[in-house]
Image (cartoon, rainbow, N blue to C red):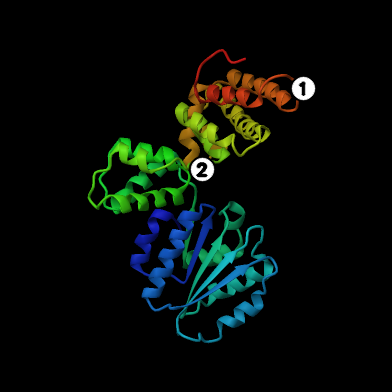
Amino acid sequence: MKIQANQLQTYLKRSLVPFYLIFGEEPYQKKEAQDAIRKEAFKQGYTEREVFEISSHFDWEQWFWGLKTPGLFSQKRFIECRLIEGSNIGKKGSEILIQLALDPPTDILFLLSLQKLDAKTENTAWFKALDPLGLSLVVRNLSSKEFSVWLENQLQQAGFKTTKEVIHALTERTEGHLLSAAQSIEKLQLCYPAGALLTLTDITDLIGVDTRFSLFDLVDSILSGSIDRTKRIFACLIKENEPILVLWVLLREVRTIIPMAYDIENDQPISAVLQRHGVWKHRIPLIADFLRRFNVSELQKTLIKAKKIDDIIKGYAPGNAWDALYGLCLYLAGVRFEYT
């Protein structure tokens, strides 16, 4: 059964299951989930832990027979398998995992850490065999709103009282970087007693700026029409990205949305359009909001502007590529000006 990270503790309190599968690329939440499962397993007697790094050349047969060997220190074992990035389970691995699903060992708990869960993985035979017997935890990067909620909960758990201004200030300094946010809260705990009401000065004096954004955070901010956040993300991204990559991501999104805009201009309901074009559930509000702000003609004009930016990047036209990209981002986010 697939669950979200914030549901894990609820399920752990009920009972342990034979298989835990953790998917995702957000390291802090992934580590938190792994630690929580290990802790509960240890409490329930799974005290012998073995860790395996799974590559494409992993010897699944030897690993499987090793499971039949009694543990050295405990009758109950906790087996962790971490799929190395770029590797896959493979045919033999699939066969072994299916075999385990048909007859799960009663004295072994399995934790498998993998990359992003996609439709291809969900359709594999091994996933279909394991998922009904265990929990599949999906870890993903948090949206700006989700990050603020997570941050507020973490501060409350740390014993602090907060205000909206404090949450906003700490979000601005650590958004997209959960580890940095957690470390900032630990720093606050060293400086202020439990139950203290944090002020804006406490945050600005003690916590530096350590945000981390992806190009997809920029796109989502633009789609939502969040102008200030778009400015902040853009300023962070130019330090570690090439302009051609930023342009490519923006163009891909606009080209994906244009056919939806055509359908809406032909009087088709927006909800039906988004469903037919396969928009993911968590992105529906973003795309819908963007489509209310732009029509087909305006979107097509942005493609022309993008071609001019591409010429600047390639040296065919004069100008500063980052300045031009900044203007395009602000225009798409909702700043209405004569964009040339």
Q: Percent x, y for residue 267? A: 52, 23
Instruction: Please state which amino acid type lies under the numbered disc 1.
Output: Tyr
In the image, is 15 to the left or to the right of 67?
left
Residue at 52% x, 78% y is: 103
Quadrant in the rendering for residue 285: top left
Residue 22 in sight: yes
Q: Depth check: give the residue in front, 273 or 97.
A: 97
Q: Residue at x 46, y 63 (%)?
A: 34
Helix, strand, or loop for circle 2? loop
Q: Which mark is residue 212?
A: 2
Q: Which residue is mark 1?
A: 316
Q: Residue at x 62, y 35 (%)?
A: 249
Residue 137 relative to residue 62: left or right: left
Residue 223 at what x, y percent from top left?
Answer: 51, 30
Above or below, 159 against 59 in this view is above
The quadrant holding residue 46 is bottom left
Three-letter amino acid code at the position of disc 2: Arg
Percent coordinates x, y for residue 214 in the rendering: 55, 41
Above or below, comparing residue 322 to residue 62 in the picture: above
Judging depth in this view, the residue of 206 and 136 nearest the camera is: 206
Q: Secondary structure at mark 1?
A: loop
